Image (spheres, rainbow, N blue to C red):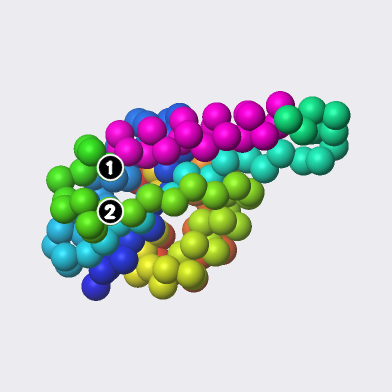
């Protein structure tokens, strides 16, 4: 049923990623499926980087390389054949990039980690709530 699973991860919040990955691995193993990890980096605005283009490029390159290293470390935690695990790094709004990638890959489900809620988000973290609200496929929220 869930042959293609998308797991958005923040490589700097590995505790959230670890919980979501455990669930994704279970579903992928039971269906001989594939896992797609997605890390979304913030996009630098032109106003913020004006006059510092070279520095912004260096920072972007550093963040991409750092994210790749951390994604590779996450992949090693999974007990699946390497050819069944893919990772993607994008820049932009988290919700928009997750929804876009889910549609592009025709995933069967999205599994997202969520931190403890606060009064503003009621039941879910703000990013998880936004993904649940706009996704076109089932979303599993893992705490």
Marks 2 & 1, CB-CB < 8 Å contact: yes
In the picture of the structure, the residue carrying the numbered disc 2 is: 85
Structural distance between the alpha carbons of marks 2 and 1: 7 Å
Residue 90 relative to residue 86: left or right = right
Quadrant including the C terminus = top left
> Is 105 included in the stretch rendered in magenta?
no
* Residue at x-position 67% and y-position 43%: 43
Name the outermost residue toward the front: 54
Taking the image as drawn, is residue 88 in sight?
yes
In the picture of the structure, the residue carrying the numbered disc 1 is: 75
- The x, y position of residue 107, in whole percent, is 38, 68
Please provide the residue range marked out in magenta: 55-74
In the rendered image of this protein, does residue 75 appear above or below residue 29?
A: above
Q: Main secondary structure of the magenta part?
A: helix
Give residue 36's quadrant in the image: bottom left
Residue situated in front as seen by the camera: 12 or 63: 63
Residue 120 relative to residue 11: left or right = right
Q: Decide: few, some or many residues near mark 1? Use Cα within 10 Å; few <14, some 14-19, many ≥20.
A: some
- The x, y position of residue 129, in whole percent, is 53, 51
Quadrant including the N terminus = bottom left
- The x, y position of residue 18, in whole percent, is 30, 37
Residue situated in front as seen by the camera: 4 or 61: 61
N-terminal of the two: label 2 or label 1?
A: 1
* Residue at x-position 30% and y-position 34%: 73
> Is 64 included in the stretch rendered in magenta?
yes
């Amino acid at each position: 049923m869930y042959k293609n699973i998308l797991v958005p991860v923040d490589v700097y919040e590995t505790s959230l990623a670890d919980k979501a990955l455990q669930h994704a691995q279970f579903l992928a193993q039971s269906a001989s499926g594939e896992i797609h990890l997605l890390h979304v980096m913030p996009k630098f605005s032109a106003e913020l980087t004006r006059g510092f283009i070279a520095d912004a490029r260096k920072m972007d390159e550093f963040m991409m390389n750092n994210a790749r290293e951390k994604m590779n470390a996450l992949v090693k935690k999974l007990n699946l054949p390497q050819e069944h695990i893919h990772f993607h790094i994008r820049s932009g709004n988290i919700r928009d990039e997750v929804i876009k990638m889910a549609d592009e890959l025709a995933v069967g489900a999205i599994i997202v980690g969520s931190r403890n809620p606060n009064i503003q988000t009621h039941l879910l973290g703000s990013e998880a709530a936004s993904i649940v609200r706009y996704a076109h496929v089932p979303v599993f929220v893992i705490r």
